[in-house]
Amino acid sequence: MKRLFPIFLFAALVLAGCDAWVIRPAPYQIPTPFSTRTPAIYSPTPIILAPPFTATFTPAVTTTSQIVSPTFTDTPVAPTITTPDGSQTPPVQISVSILGCNTSIDITHGMGEVTNAYATIQNLGTADLQNVCATLHALDEGRPHPDKTQCTPSLPAKYQVTQKLTVDTTYKKDTPIQIDVTSNDLLLQRVGQDSCTDIGVFAPGIDDLGVVKPIP
């Protein structure tokens, strides 16, 4: 035991002189405080923020216009025809009557609905009329129909003729019509109706159309 005591004493002195940490920790450092922002300075001048964009608005200009629909009116004419030798014939007196209308489908001319108008032209004067033509017009007329104009080479005094005139019109829609009657391209009379009534079963027979007959 006395021999071991010096050994224990030596060991204690050696251990007292050694550090027990295998890895020495870093020395503790006092943290540096974060820097603070400069406080905002408020002034009586208001802060104006610029908008992200600038838009220019131009007011739209609206124009208005009046649409005037044609009105078909009767225009009786009694012209005086001058012959080549300078003499004048008695004033022309005619009467134009619209008997009525009906509609049909015209496949022959590649059209849809067409309106047929029946008109009787009477020569009430004392002079014979040459090249008497009747032309049908409609307010909603489409493509020109080949039967919109019908002519009679000669219409003697006190005679009459009934013509069937056809125009291309809108499907299932009432339409105002107008008929112009001319003689040698001179307008004699113009008649019209706001809505042509259905002629029904009273339409002239096909044998009576375009035939010059005495006025009954």
Image (spheres, rainbow, N blue to C red):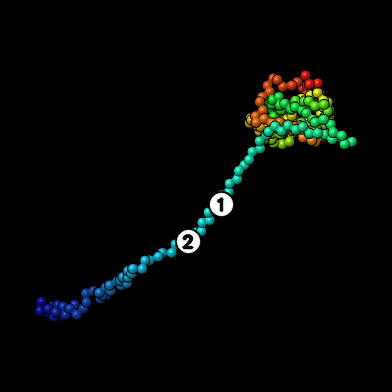
The residue lying at 22 percent from left, 77 percent from top is: 19
| CA distance separating discs 2 and 1 | 25 Å
> How dense is the environment of label 1, judged by Cα within 10 Å: few (below 14), some, or many (20 and up)?
few
Quarter of the image where one finds residue 2: bottom left
Q: Quadrant of the N terminus?
A: bottom left
Q: Position of residue 93 (x, y in %)?
A: 78, 28
The residue lying at 80 percent from left, 27 percent from top is: 125
The residue lying at 53 percent from left, 54 percent from top is: 59
Pointers 2 and 1 in contact (C-beta within 8 Å)? no
Q: Amino acid at mark 2?
A: Phe
Of the pair 45 and 5, the residue shown nearer to us: 45
Q: Quadrant of the C terminus?
A: top right
Query: Is residue 107 visible from the viewing direction of this image?
Result: no
Q: Position of residue 215 (x, y in %)?
A: 78, 21
Q: Is residue 137 above or below residue 47?
A: above
Q: Is residue 19 left or right of residue 209?
A: left
Instruction: Tell me, for residue 126, which label it has, or none.
Output: none
Residue identified by numbered label 1:
61
Q: Amino acid at mark 1?
A: Val
Query: Is residue 55 visible from the viewing direction of this image?
Result: yes
